[in-house]
Amino acid sequence: MIHRVRVVPSAERLPREEQLAWKIAEVASDEAAGRAVVADREVLEALSNRLIDNAAVALAAIDREPVANARTMALAHPRPRGATLFGLGESVTVDAEWAAWANATAVRELDFHDTFLAADYAHPADNIAPLVAVAQQTGRDGAALARGLAVAYQVQVSLVTAISLHAHKKDHMAHLAPATAAGIGAMLELPTAVIYQAVQQAVHTAFTTRQSRKGEISSWKAYVPGYSALLAIVAVDRAMRGEASPSPIYEGEDSVIAWMLGGSGAVYDVPLPSPGEPPRAVLDTFSKEHSAEYQAQALIDLAFRMRERVTDWDRVARVLVRTSHHTHFVIGSGANDPQKYDPSATRETLDHSIPYILAVALQDGRWHHVNSYLPERAARTDTVRLWRRIETVEDPAWTARYHDPDPDRKAFGGRVEITLDDGSVIADELEVAHAHARGARPLDRAAYVAKLDALTDDRLEPEERARFLGLAERLARLGPEDVRALIPALPSGTVTRATRDARGIF
C-alpha cells in the first residue's frame, strides 16, 4: 500500500484517518498482522540475529568513554523491577527510558550494527534497546516484543524508503523516533488513536540537523539513538495518559514537510503494509562485518582483494573511487570536510571517511573495531601519504544502483582505480559487501554468534553466553521473566564505572 503525503492547508481539515501518522498507527495496531509476526520463522530468525548482533557490539564498547558516561547517567535513575543495562546483570535496574538511553548508546558507539539505505539512511536496530527496556519494565513477553520490533523496523524502513532527510540536512533520528513509538505501541497493544498521538509527538520532537555527522564528528553520534529512545518513550507515556500532540505532524501548514523537508509542493509516496499484511521489513536490512559506516563495507572488502596487486604503496600516485551520490557526499571527499583527511580527527570522523578507511584497508588487509582507528595508526606517515591521494567522485551509474527498487540490483559499493607512478592503473569494483545477502559470505546465525564471540573475547562467561543465546534464539516463546534476562551480563567487577558518579547533575 502506498500512502501519498503532502502539505494540506489548515482550512481543508485533513481527516486524521488520511494522515501519515494515523496510517503508521494503523500498522502498529493491526492485530492480524501482529499475530502473523510470531508465526513468521524468517522474521523471527532475523530479529533474533539482531538481538545477538546488538549484544555483541554493545559489550565490545562497554568501557568506552561515551558508553560509560551514558551508563552512569542511567544509574542515577534506579527503579525496582525497571530495565537492565548491558553488562551489569538483573540485580541492577533503572527507569526504562534511561536504560534505553544507555543501552542504545552502547550499541551505536562502534558503528557496527545493522543498516538500511534508500532515500535516506537508518540503523533500524537502534529500536531494539528502547523496546526491550519498555518490555522489561511493563512485563511483556517475547511474542509482544517480537511484534513491536517487527513494527518498528517496518515503520523506519518505510519512512527511509520514501523521505530523504539528508537532502534537507536533517538527521535520521526524525525517522527513528516515530518508528520506536510505533513499535512500543504495537508491543503494548495500544489503540490506534493513542499510537497516533505518540507518533506525532515523536516526530515533532525528533527533528535535528545533520551537523551531528558533519565535519569533526563527536560522540553525540553514538548518543543519538539513546536520545531518540528517550523522546519516543516519553511520547508513548504521555499519549497513554490521554494527551494529544501537534497535528497533522507531517501534513500541517507549519509542520515538518512544509518547513523542514520538501516544502508546500512536496509529495512523498510512503510504502506501508496493507491491512493484515505482516511487517517484514527487517528482512530488507543489512548487518555489518566491519566497524565502519555501511557504505564503506563493500569498499573495505574490495580493498582486501586489490591490495595483493600493489607491491609498493609509495608508487601509488592516485586512488579514485567511483561511487554513489550518497557515498561521495556523506563519507567521501564530496563532503568537503577537511577533517576526513586529518590524522588527529576523532574516531567518529574516521569511521565516516572513505579516504581513511580505504587507505588502512589497502595497507593492512584487515579491519579491527579498535586497532584500525588508533591515533598511532591514523598518524602513520605512509598511511597519511596514501590517504591524501584518495578521492571519491559520484558516478551516475552507481547512484542509480544505490536507489534501484529491485533488491537484486541495488548496490552500495563502487569502483576503485589505483594509478601508479608509471601511469598504469589497477582497477576493480564490488557491488555489495561480502556480508550482504547477495554477497560472497552472507551473515547467518553462525556468523552472528561468531561475531559475539570475537567481540566479547573471554569476558562473556560460557554459561552466560549459552543462557543469552538460548533466550535470543527462542524470542517469540519467552515469558516476561525471560525478557527481563535478555540483556547479557559480564562477570562482576569487569565493567568500569558501574556505579553512579557525581560529575554531572544527576
Image (cartoon, rainbow, N blue to C red):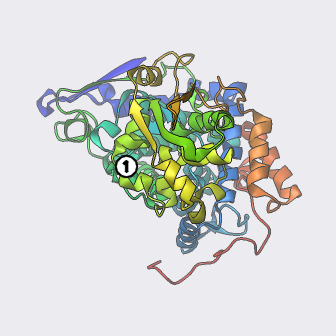
Picture coordinates of residue 61, whole percent (x, y): 64, 60
- Residue for badge 1: 242
**Secondary structure of the residue carrying numbered label 1:** loop
Residue in the foreground of this view, choosing between 403 and 413: 413
Q: State which quarter of the image contains the N terminus.
A: top left
Picture coordinates of residue 140, whole percent (x, y): 64, 47
Picture coordinates of residue 478, whole percent (x, y): 75, 43
Q: Residue at x 82, y 53 (%)?
A: 465
Three-letter code for the amino acid on which mark 1 is drawn: Gly
Q: Is residue 188 left or right of residue 143?
A: left
Residue at the extreme right of the image, as rendered: 463
For residue 203, above or below residue 435: below
User: In the rendered image, which quarter is residue 83 located in?
Assistant: bottom right
Residue at the extreme left of the image, as rendered: 11
For residue 244, above or below residue 36: below
User: In the rendered image, which quarter is residue 302 located in?
Assistant: top right
Local crowd size for mark 1, using a 10 Å CA cut-off: few (<14), some (14–19), many (≥20): few
Residue in the foreground of this view, choosing between 62 and 144: 62
Q: Residue at x 79, y 63 (%)?
A: 459
Q: Is residue 68 left or right of residue 91?
A: left
Q: Is residue 262 visible?
A: yes
Q: Is residue 492 left or right of residue 54?
A: right
Q: Residue at x 52, y 84 (%)?
A: 502
